[in-house]
Image (tube, rainbow, N blue to C red):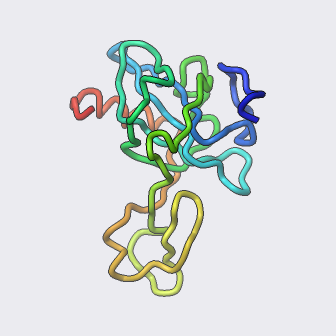
Amino acid sequence: MLNEVKYPFVPKSNRSLIPGQFWAIPLNNGKFACGRVIEVHPFETKMFLAGLVNWIGEVVPKENDLAGKQTIKQGQVHIKTIHETGSDGMIIGYRNLSLDKIEPDFFKSQDGYQSGTSKLMKGCQEIRPLTKDESDLYPTFSTWGYDVIRVLAEELSVSKKI
């Protein structure tokens, strides 16, 4: 499928997404941040796990700009996130996640801990029951609003933590 993809393109559903694809996020200061597709949701057609990359640039990112760059935060997003935050709402390229040792983060399925219902997740996948000791170790799996990734990128750009 990678050979069939022509960049840039506007995705209509998550079925056209491949983990490792990325989009440019224009910032208020004229710079750009970068979002990446981390995991495609296994049964939803509009949701996927996105990551904000530890990268800020003067121009839209190219594949080589992302070499060695990790994700700062990951969250489940709607396909419209790319339309709302991306330059022209487009996926602009692809870089294999394994080249940068990026994997879906670990999460807990809910705030707090409830025996029997709290799950440990890797990305969108529940992998096993969460132990009480683990409940403080992992962030809660969350669904971000359309603009959350851009807001996080703006905060990181201003704080110069990138």
Picture coordinates of residue 42, whole percent (x, y): 70, 56
At a point 39% along the width and 21% down the height, the residue shown is: 27
The answer to which image quadrant residue 148 occupies is top left
Quadrant of the frame with the C terminus: top left
The tally of labels here is 0
- Residue sitting nearer the eye, 155 or 60: 60
The answer to which image quadrant residue 91 occupies is top right
Location of residue 50 with respect to 5 vertically, above or below: below
- Residue sitting nearer the eye, 58 or 79: 58
At a point 60% along the width and 17% down the height, the residue shown is: 88
Picture coordinates of residue 5, whole percent (x, y): 73, 27
In the displayed structure image, the side of residue 123 where residue 113 appears, left or right:
left
Location of residue 116 with respect to 77 vertically, above or below: below
Picture coordinates of residue 111, whole percent (x, y): 41, 69
Location of residue 34 with respect to 57 vertically, above or below: below
At a point 43% along the width and 38% down the height, the residue shown is: 52
Location of residue 91 with respect to 110 vertically, above or below: above
Picture coordinates of residue 35, whole percent (x, y): 49, 33
In the displayed structure image, the side of residue 112 where residue 2 appears, left or right:
right
Q: Residue furthest front?
A: 99
Quadrant of the frame with the N terminus: top right
At a point 36% along the width and 13% down the height, the residue shown is: 58
The answer to which image quadrant residue 18 occupies is top right
